[in-house]
Image (cartoon, coloured by chain):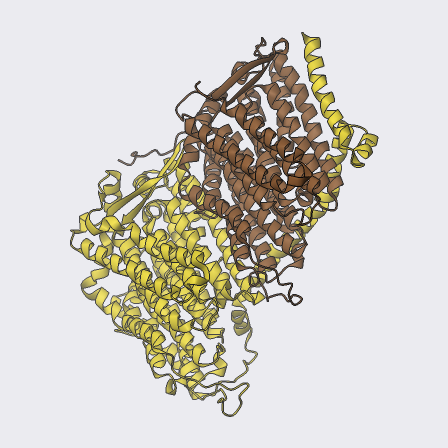
Chain colours: A yellow, B brown
Amino acid sequence: MNTYALLAAEGEVAAATGITAYAWLLVLLPLLGAAILLLGGKATDAWGHLLATALSWGSFVLGFVIWIAMIGRGAEERPAHVGGWNWVPAGQFQLETGLLIDQLSVAFVLLITFVGSLIHVYSIGYMEHDVDRRKFFAYLNLFVASMLLLVLADSYLLLFVGWEGVGLASYLLIGFWNHNPAYATAANKAFFVNRVGDVGMSIAIMFMFFTFGSVDFATVHAAAPEAGSTAMTALGLLLLIGACAKSAQFPLQSWLGDAMAGPTPVSALIHAATMVTAGVYLIVRSHAIFNAAPNAQLAVAIVGAITLLYGAIVGCAKDDIKKALAASTMSQIGYMMLAAGLGPVGYAFAIFHLITHGFFKAGMFLGAGSVMHGMKDRVDMRGFGGLSKYMKITWITFGLGWLAILGVPPFSGYWSKDGIIESAFIGEGWRPWVFGGIAMLGAGITAFYMSRLFFMTFHGKERWVDEHEDAERGVHPHESPLTMTVPMIVLAVGSGLLGLVLSFGDTFTHWLEPLVGGHGDEHPVLAVPVIIGLTLLLVAGGAFYAWMLYVRDAVPVTAPRGSLVTQAARADLYQDAINEGLFMRPGIHLTRALVFTDGKGVDGVAGSIAASIGGLSSRLRRLQTGYARSYALTMLTGVVAVLGALWVMN
Amino acid sequence: MSGLPLLTLMLVVPLVGAAVVWLLPATSSRLAKPIALATSLLTLALALVAWARFDNGGDRYQLTETHSWIPQFGVSYALGVDGIALSLIVMATILTPICLLAAWNDLGEDADPQREKTYFALMLVLLTFMVGVFAARDVFLFYVFFEAMLIPVYFLIGLFGGPRRQYAAVKFILFSLVGGLIMLVAVIALYFYGPGGEQGFLYESLEGQVGGSTAAQRWMFLGFFIAFAIKAPMWPVHTWLPDAAAESRPATAVLLVGVLDKVGTFGMLRFCLGFFPEASKWATPVVITLAVISVIYGALLAIGSRDIMRLIAFTSISHFGFIVMGIFAMTSTAGAGSALYMVNHGFATAGLFLLAGFLIARHGSQRIADYGGWQRVTPVLAGSFLVAGLSSLALPGLSSYVSEFLVLAGTFQRYKWAAAIATVGIVLAALYILLTYQRVFTGPRPTFVEGSEPRDLGLREKLVIAPIIASFILLGFYPKPVLDLVNPAVEQTLQLVGATDPAPTHATGSAQ
């Protein structure tokens, strides 16, 4: 049993003291911002975005101070608990709210508030001319508050409130421009797919109550190791369904590509850096359950492995810069899931990669937004090319993200992804070879599609027309304003250095180890230098192939038909078609049929029985003429009948 | 028992108000609406006083009043409430002024004054009966209120409803009548098999005291259950509700679906479980099955509805399925969940019906397909509708979620598959709410004839909707006041049934 669970079981997670006791403010500050902006209406138009940004930074500062305070305590005393109020006292079910401030939640708090606040700043520029800017910032604040609640909650039920809160914010922001019907549909799709995951989550929470009599982390995690692997496997699989939907993992991944309908800052924050990684958080947070359920763990690893390839393959075929990045996000979260499915050897690396990915992917999305900003909101990379000359800052910052995601040393992604690949090679039997092999292969494909994206956008021949030549179809690429470039620069610095800093002396993994366990003396089935060497070789190969196709050779402005594989990848490997054929069409037919039979069948039968009991059809007709008097009479008859009957009995 | 007979006062005040409103001379008929509103607010104040006087740890029935009425037949004029009844009374008295305010201009600016007076007087009469049916402590008195409630509703639909109001009103009456007559037989039998005497119809006399053979008890159970299943419409006797709701004025629909129908679930808890514990257990498998079917069926039909009022009615059938399931799961968690659900559903449904009403008032159509893009025209209305919808789909953080979760978690303790299948309802709920939102509010901004642009919510409408939305958030994060109120009543009911909560399979601390 791990330390936290032991501590929790003995009631030794200390009540928070000092600044940590104010942890609720982390959630409340941005929540207050959302409330003011939404209720204040137009009166807040002028300054609402500034307030929202300030409050988000406020949460970051508080989170930072709480983190410093935590460093000051010894590893065993770091977790702290902040009580809340008596939330649901209902018969046997009793639950109070509370926040759990430990190494894991603080890491998330810093990621969410830092990247989140940067994206607030970026949005000041990006959304400057939008009529609904105030709402946009309100939703962003709502998102930050919900996401913080998700990672700070001390029980599954409270976590679920944050879980749905981020889902709501995501829905609102994907559909932010829902005057475009396609975008409204995309928003709904995201919500519906997530609801499928919610079924898993809900049943999991019920199952916890049934099994442990409680749904708070301390109780559940303390009792999980003893509860038997069958029950814990069921529980783990249910949680995995929830995690798959939220983190866009196979087979519930179909919503993420469409979610790119939202404004680009949203894609960066919600659909790359934070919300979509919540599934990984859930698995790692529930490690006590998964450690007790090897089969559920295996399922997590398999889902991760499938998705990392799935996303990578789809990413190779997309011409829409945002959708290519979305596919990449899916794939990278696949890596994290795979790591989380490996158990204690992988948990810390899953979170490590989650953090570095949060920086480099958010940075690249902001870069994509900057490109769109300069290219009249176009997203088709076949119409880009050679932009490095016109957008120097965007090019360099994006380039750092590109190097990071490729896993080129010493950039961030190398440290975290390499850790996952090495961990995947640990184990016995077929597993290390399959998981390790897939993780390594994925790195090569990633190098190809990310390089393709980078080269198609910034290098090669210019495939657009200048505004001077064609006012209608032409563009005038230009660098974005400071509010946009500064956040990009900051994130690029993170993409460059964060991995190195956090893995220096294994700082980050050691930080999490007291909580989630870590490497023992297991060794990969291949020597570590061999793994690193082979991976880098594949990465170089992928990048070189992309260079041949997209820099050396000319890129056709209209996409060639492509092979069957390319066509399938373009269509997201036909996931939408499958969903539509399996669920949507039958569903539509079912509801139509039910509406028909409800009117004809059920109503007919029930109605005629009612009519025959309530009186003959002549009576029905008389009532239908509208004389309420006959009803009053009927009523009276009823009461008289009772009295009469009672009298007879007496 | 000190001071005022509060419950009787709450019956009398709206009735007097109704009489005043109705009899107002033509010269001062513009006072009708303010008087009606004031009356309902006074009743609300009385309800709050009752709540303040209620002791959560006290007797089963409180604020009791007992007077002999027809002692020969064991009938008393007896009032008294437990926590569940009180919570529903408070809900009804909060919703009534909201509905009156929402209905303020229902009949138009230049309505016939007498017609308008009748409309508002009827709603006050309905308030009396709503309070009465929950406050009764005598089965016969309950039956009288149960039947009497139909009259104002019949007129509210039949006189003030939509184009097919006659059909809907008659269908409503017929179904209710059938239920009422079946229940009547059971009421008579109850006196026969009960302890009898001058107070033979008193709840206390009957709880745990109903004799007779197993078969007799089961028949009586069925008599009550069928009546209540029609009232809180469960599949397959639900078909009156969509018609009634679609042809009602929104305010009437709120009181009908949000309050009146709760008499069904309230009755199941109090009469079926309280008087016929054995029969209730015998019937449980069938009832739970019907409840699960209602959950899924109501949701599917809501998805398929083209009329927004029908749609909301179908969502309620789904929600009533949850409530019934929680009642018959017979665990303290599910029971408290169902009791809380009754309150939350009242507000959630009120939000949807009234906002749909505001929408219809602007565009004159109940057909969903006649809308589109209204978020750009009426943003506050759109946002409010979305929040009410999210409450209806039980978004965590809003009130309905707490109750839905409790029902499901409590049911899961005994009937895993039923709870698991019902959970699928949450996907369907997202479909019926968000598809509706998409069809009505998203899309390109519609074009209107110059000068006929619909306006966003006005002050009166905001006043209507604000307390409802406040209830979603308040009861979502702090449902304790209501739970504290209903917990003891649920416990007592479960004691009558003899049901004990299943213990967790791996209780806390077993790890050490």
Give the image location of residue A227, x and y in percent.
35, 38
Q: Quadrant of residue B293?
A: top right
Say if residue B88 shows up in the picture.
no
Along the horizontal axis of the image, is A548 left or right of A496? right
Q: Look at 75% across and 40% down and name the residue there.
A: B167
Q: Nearer the viewer, residue A468 or A198?
A: A468
Q: Nearer the viewer, residue B376 or B66?
A: B66
Give the image location of residue A280, x and y in percent.
37, 56
Q: Which quadrant, please, contains the C terminus of chain B?
A: top left
Q: Quadrant of residue B487?
A: top left
Give the image location of residue A381, x and y in percent.
47, 79
Say if residue B471 shows up in the picture.
yes
Residue B204 vertical placement versus B121 (above, below): above
Residue A261 vertical placement versus B418 (above, below): below
Along the horizontal axis of the image, is A206 left or right of B357? left
Give the image location of residue A473, x and y in percent.
54, 85
Residue B8 vertical placement versus B245 (above, below): above
Residue furthest to the front in view is B27
Label tally: 0
